[in-house]
Amino acid sequence: LATGNYDQLHHFIADGIWDATPLETELLNQADRLVGGRDAVLVIDDTSLPKKGERSVGVAAQYASALGKTANCQTLVSLT
């Protein structure tokens, strides 16, 4: 894999000749074990962080749920 060669890296990742099923199965089993089993629940939520200035990544005028209005903020998604 040549450093900086996008085409080779893309081909390696996108067109792999291996069967991903065993890895995906193991990842699902580990996630189930870590989350808490059959009765566990995951909560997906957005969080707005009000920001002033222009130096933080992703800061824009967007709906800020914490403020209930459009404001200059960062928005992130959390999985709990």
Image (spheres, grey):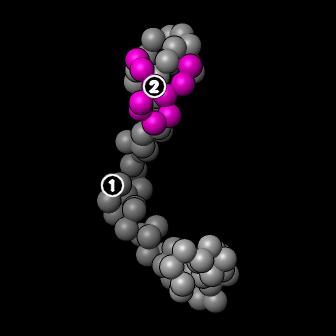
Q: Is residue 60 magenta?
A: yes
- Left or right of residue 47, residue 13 in this image: right
Residue 72 in the image, given as x and y percentages of width and height: 49, 18
Residue at position x 49%, y 28% from top? 59
Q: Residue at horizontal 45%, vertical 11%?
A: 67
Residue at horizontal 43%, vertical 75%? 26
Q: Determine the image quadrant of residue 6.
A: bottom right
Q: Position of residue 24 (x, y in %)?
A: 51, 73
Residue range (magenta) = 52-61
Q: Label for residue 36?
A: 1
Mark-to-mark CA distance, 2 and 1: 40 Å
Residue bearing mark 2: 54
Query: Mark 2: which amino acid?
Result: Glu
Q: Judging from the image, what secondary structure is the residue with disc 1 in?
A: loop
The crowd level at tag 2 (other Cα within 10 Å; few <14, some 14-19, many 20+) is few
The vertical placement of 57 against 50, above or below, is below
Name the element at disc 2: loop
